[in-house]
Amino acid sequence: MSSVLGQGESSESALALDDGSKSVGTLLGLASRLLWRDWRSGELRLLFLALVMAVTSVSGIALFTDRLEKALLLESANMLAADRVLSSGRVLPEDIFMEAQSQGLRTARTLSFTSMAFSDAGNMLVSAKAVSDTYPLRGEMIVADAPFIRGAPIASGPQPGEAWLESRALPALGIEVGDTVYVGEADFTVSKIIIAEPDRSGGGMLDNAGPRLMIHMDDVEKTNVVQLGSRVSYRFLFATDEMPLLDTFEAWVGETFEGEYRLRDVRDESQEVSEALNRAESFLLLGSLFAVLLAGVAIALTAKRYSERHYDYVAILKTFGCTSRQIGFIYLCIQALLAVVAIGVGSLLGWAVHHVILRALQAVITVDLPAAGFEPFVVGALTAVICLLSFALPPLLALRETPPLRVLRKDISQQTIGDSVPYIFGVGGTIGLVLWYSQDFVLTAVLVVAVASIGLLLSGMSYALLRSSSAVGMRAGSAWKLAMSAARRRRKQNVLQVMVFSITIMSLLILGLLRSDLISDWQAQLPEGTPNHFMMNISQPQIDGIESFFEENGVQGNAFYPLISARVTKINGAEPDPQDDLDTDAERGTLAGGAQSDDEDEEQTKGAARVGLGIGYGQGDAADSQTAEASSDNAEEADEGAVRGRLSRRQVTWAQDLPADNRVTGGEWWSEAAAPGFVSIEEDYADWLDIELGDIVEFEINAQTVSAEVNSFRSVRWDNMQPNFFIIFSPGTIDHLGATFLSTALMESEQKVLLNELVKRFPTIVVIEIDALIEQIQNIIAQVTSAIELISVLVLVCGALVLLACVNATLDERFYENAILRTLGAGKKLIMTSLLIEFASIGLMAGLVATLGAEASLYYLQEQVFEQEFNLHYWVWVAGPLAGMLIIAGLGVNSTRGVVSISPLNVLRRLN
Amino acid sequence: MIEIRKLTKSVPTSEGTLTILNAVSLAIAESETVAIVGASGSGKSTLLGLMAGLDAATSGDVLLGGHSLAAMDEEQRAVLRGQIVGFVFQSFQLLPSLTALENVMLPIELKGDDQAREKALSLLERVGLGERVTHYPNQLSGGEQQRVAIARAFATEAKILFADEPTGNLDTATGSKIIELIFDLNKEFATTLVLVTHDERLAQRCGRIVRLIAGEIESDTGAKLTSRDDAVENASV
């Protein structure tokens, strides 16, 4: 028998055992009971809260952005009166229209042209627009029965034989509703007054030359106004509630016509809206990334603490016969149960949060929101699962390795997988999550680099600390020494803690600073009182008259810019040799969004509205150049013609003073007594033509050659919807060559009737109305701003959660040490002061590192992602560390306050 | 019931290998009550931990209920513990987040027994805590906590009960009551009882006292039963 025993097998008289397997039901039951008991005892609350926060923020933000994006697109679609538009100065192929209908799209067509309208009492230039029955496809026409009153929506446009007019046309023509108006050879009965038209701001020059006159499509022929060669704008409008149909149709148009026709959406239509939307999307994405990141860190911290508190639990379970595998299963079940509940609660809260956001935005979101999809919930749930797997699983699985002997000897060290492993897992999980969520390598890289740099920085700091601390004891002599020795003793923990704090503070700083920079940028872009009317083709003698007209009528007028068409012919005596790359900031800023269009007038108006460029209405050269520029926005579309076009003509000006929103980036702006013969060039344009300061550039202006020395480069704020110029001469250089003038004015809606008088008094000038466009952009920016504010708050909550979790993570040890100190006679004041100093120095360091990281990340984000100018935020260098110190010290001391109020015996008993 | 064969436990330290137990052999029969005594650091708790299969020996073997622990991995030892071993600890080792009742139910539930609640209730009743079943450990006195631990130890009707300084954290009067309780239940359930103690009163209640000094058995009041191998060898002589 001894030999049998010697081989380590059971003796024949061994007690019978079953295989020890417990039914899945038993383990599940046990897991759920453990979960419930842990919940009840409060052990799980922080972990659960972190999970719920992750799901809530992600699903809430995803829901909100999903719906907001749909809504914004819808609302902006109103600017087009359609989802997609095809426009041209030539007749559009009927095939396209038919194909759209056969693919199930809703369609409409419009035709714009300028014409004189006559009445028995007078006449005026009107922007005529003929529309089909189905117009508009998006947004609504608002009409009234009398001019200058509030109107009501109407389903479709005028019927054959009817004409609708904008209010101010009636006094100009001296007619009333019901009277007759003549256009070409046809006569119409004025049946309604147009108060608002959805795509009024999105039209071209032909739509902005005078008040609107709208007729039915079928009546165009009988006016006999539109002839071969007439300047008209044909438009096909398309809309559908099923987005994929649009994509299919778009692809079909592209393939069938080999890029000759391109459908445009609102992003092509309005640079400003598109930029606001893109930035808002990037911001929301960044916000939710931070929310996920922070919730992930909170999960990691709370899971680690949870598992540490469960070592004894597991040791006892093992003592009572639970195998490691069963322990693993139980904790997996706990996680799964936790995840299910957290996903449920988080999704509900996410739903609520997005409703709160929507409610807050109610005033600005004027369209009905499309229903939310299911996707945001899936995103939220997946986030929770990935967070759990990468952040919580490692420490919980480490529990399996708890030696049962721990029940006898507490000092037996936990055979964990190492302190850093959960963090490594977490980092891997975070990168994966961020990448998956953003689908954006740049953003992911910025985040990873920022966090990694913080890690490196802190490793260096901890190394320095290690070197400086020769003796590490309690050093209980003074609070300061006590705190410092405590900080050193927990060096590893503290470095991790500083890291978590600084990542949190950094996230909040980045988001907060980005938020205020974005908002102030937008406010600066279109401040209150932005001029909303352009007047062009003004001759020198008319200037005084216009100025006094504005003064008499209380209209806020602005400076008059001379305007003249010029062409660069030589640079330092050589032919210009432009770079190939056309995708400069100026291109993106100035030109219509990449539309391949031959609707010249339309492009031209946009150019004017957007940047006040290429303004000379009717000047063929300028129009050509604008069109060429517009079509060359995409590098792949650039061709020889485009380059020639961009070189051929520029609307240039001269000025004594640097225009507002311009900044000199090289050289110097001329002084008051400047001699003629100097020129200032926009920096990207100079770059494109390879012009250096001091170069002599030769221009052809009105058949004369003018040379000027380049003495400054400028950056120009292209999105401010004010007159901006690539080329500005010093006074006296080109003054003698004959120029027309351009000016802007702010006219409130009730002042618009003055336009009749203005045009009557100065018949040669052209007025472009961009008030509707500006209002729409301001509206969208207001929405986006509110959205950004709310996301910031959500991330702030996540950040607070992480800070709390992080302080809690080292609570036990601090409690224990300080309980011993108190037992040994340390006073309340000494302990509290030492804790305060320890937390404050951790917070100070975290704040400093966070500020550094935030500024570095912001530099990259603003320059690359948000296309903003980066400026150091000096006040943050003081406020960041200070805030870190105050917050961490406050939180830390508040959480550990108990150590001096509970008796040391209780603390020691509780922790043993 | 328990047989220890040349059990050695050594651990590496910075000053070389430290031998905590040195080739200890011991046999304990069914229903025997054994006290292991000795000074601090004599290896009592280590021996208990190895006997109970909570730790693995450096060399030698333990037969627990006829099963060789040396041949088992931690998973198999856990199964064995769950089925034949019960524990009482000096520091009670109650789970703070569970009530008294839940603490007692835990091992029964782990065995997959549907009657966990009933059994636990009746045991708590038996240890005199019928009125306090819903209390949490921190709401109970030390003595009461140890009663709960005792109820939990007997809950699975274990064949062997290991107790590590069961009165070590209790005052004399409470300790005496606990001793009574352990022995009463031991008798009732006919359990083999092995306890480690400093408490002479407690040791004297046991049928046999094994005294350890520096990891070796210095004396054993049941010396003739020290090793079955010896007995076999003696018999064969």
Image (cartoon, grey):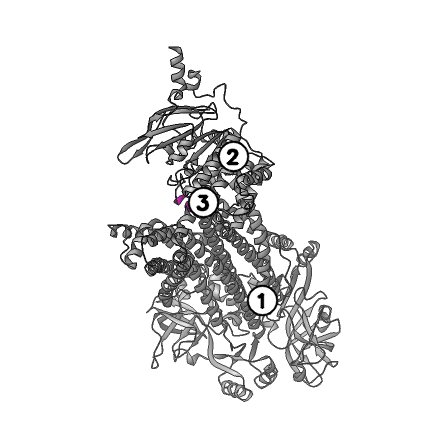
Upstream in the sequence, badge 3 or badge 2? 3
Residue contact at pointers 1 and 2, CB within 8 angstroms: no
Most prominent secondary structure in the magenta stretch?
A: helix
Closer to the observer: label 1 or label 3? Answer: 3
Q: Amino acid at mark 3?
A: Gly
Q: Residues within 10 Å of mark 3 (few under 14, many from 20)?
A: some
Q: Residues within 10 Å of mark 1 (few under 14, many from 20)?
A: some
Label 3 in the same subunit as label 2: yes
Residue contact at pointers 3 and 2, CB within 8 angstroms: no
Q: Secondary structure at mark 1?
A: helix
A423 falls in the magenta region: yes
Task: Please name the residue that numbered disc 3 is placed on.
Answer: B142
Q: Which residues are magenta?
A: A417-425
Above or below, B70 relative to A753: above
Left or right placement of residue A806 versus residue B125 in this view: left
Q: Which is more toward the observer, A617 or A893?
A: A893
Q: Look at the image and tell me whether residue A189 can be seen.
A: yes
Above or below, A82 relative to A440: below
Q: Chain of mark 1?
A: A
